[in-house]
Amino acid sequence: MDPKNQRVKLNDGHFIPALGFGTGAPPEVPKSEAVEVTKFAIEAGFRHIDSAHAYQNEEQVGQAIRSKIADGTVKREDIFYTSKVWSTSLRPELVQPALEKSLKDLQLDYVDLYIIHQPVALMPGEAIFPTDENGKPIFDSVDLCRTWEALEKCKDAGLTKSIGVSNFNHKQLEKILNKPGLKYKPVCNQVECHPYLNQSKLLEFCKSHDIVLVAYGALGAQRTLQWVNPNLPFLLEDPVLSAIAKKHKQTPALVALRYQIQRGVVVLAKSYNRKRIKENIQVFDFELTPEEMKAIEGLNSNIRYYDLQHFVDHPEYPYSEEY
């Protein structure tokens, strides 16, 4: 199947490709690598590219997209590009300048989706993670409804086609949905989501409000990442996923991605390994049975690899709520 055509309709009428390429990488990966793997992902058939100011690679990702437009592989409108406003720019007056900075780095005229990276506001400034002399994060206090109004203005200005959020719990989403004078609903909530944390309650909530759930960490997490608890079980070694994969002659990673697509979740596949990038696009070549979906559903154990633990003392820390 042609992955370019597997798209999900957003509540503002735009369409998002069901499979996306995640560009975030650990700091030890050279930035130049982002150019090469993003180009490779586009060549392999990915049309949805997910990045963020905080990944500090938008210059390289933009370069890759523009080079694939220049050589005729794609047109700009074939690419769905997501950026995110980082925590240090959540004050309303900082949102549009942050998006303009991303566009300047990308050298693009607009992004397809601009989302609030996470609800915890940090002290404005150059540092991605501002910390005090004890290494504790320096928090900021922002009304997220005002931040949202600034995103609405970015959409009206044509700098982004769609706007959404990331790492919000249902109460934080509700706050925006119930905001007096709401002009646009969030089109999505991008959250960690995989068979060990299947987010079924949040997914149900989002579906009931016509908000698309976008899954990151869909393959679990690499053990090496500094902010991931190394004692957690490794998702891709799960015996249930392995058995289903074997039956379909696919990899456990593909089974984990396919699971999301079949439940109406847009899924990001993050890999800097060319063989696996090519493999991940094959998610449209097979289908899981209802029994297999049920078996995967049964793996849910609320294991969160990315728990934002260092932000736990912030009043907007999202994971104190059940969902």
Image (cartoon, grey):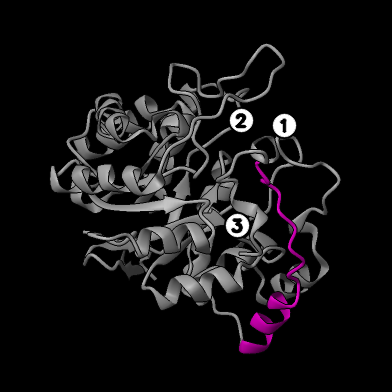
Residue depicted at 43% across the width and 38% down the height: 142
Type of amino acid at the residue the image marks with label 3: Ala
* Residue denoted by label 2: 26
265, above or below 161, in the image:
below
Please identify the residue farthest to the bottom as the structure is shown.
290
Residue depicted at 68% across the width and 88% down the height: 291
305, above or below 204, in the image:
above
In the image, which disc is placed on residue 24? none
Quarter assignment of residue 182:
bottom left
Type of amino acid at the residue the image marks with label 1: Gln
Range shown magenta: 290-308
Sequence-first disc among 3 and 2: 2
Sequence-first disc among 2 and 1: 2
In the image, which disc is placed on residue 226? 1
In percent of width and height, residue 78 lies at 24, 53
In percent of width and height, residue 164 lies at 36, 53
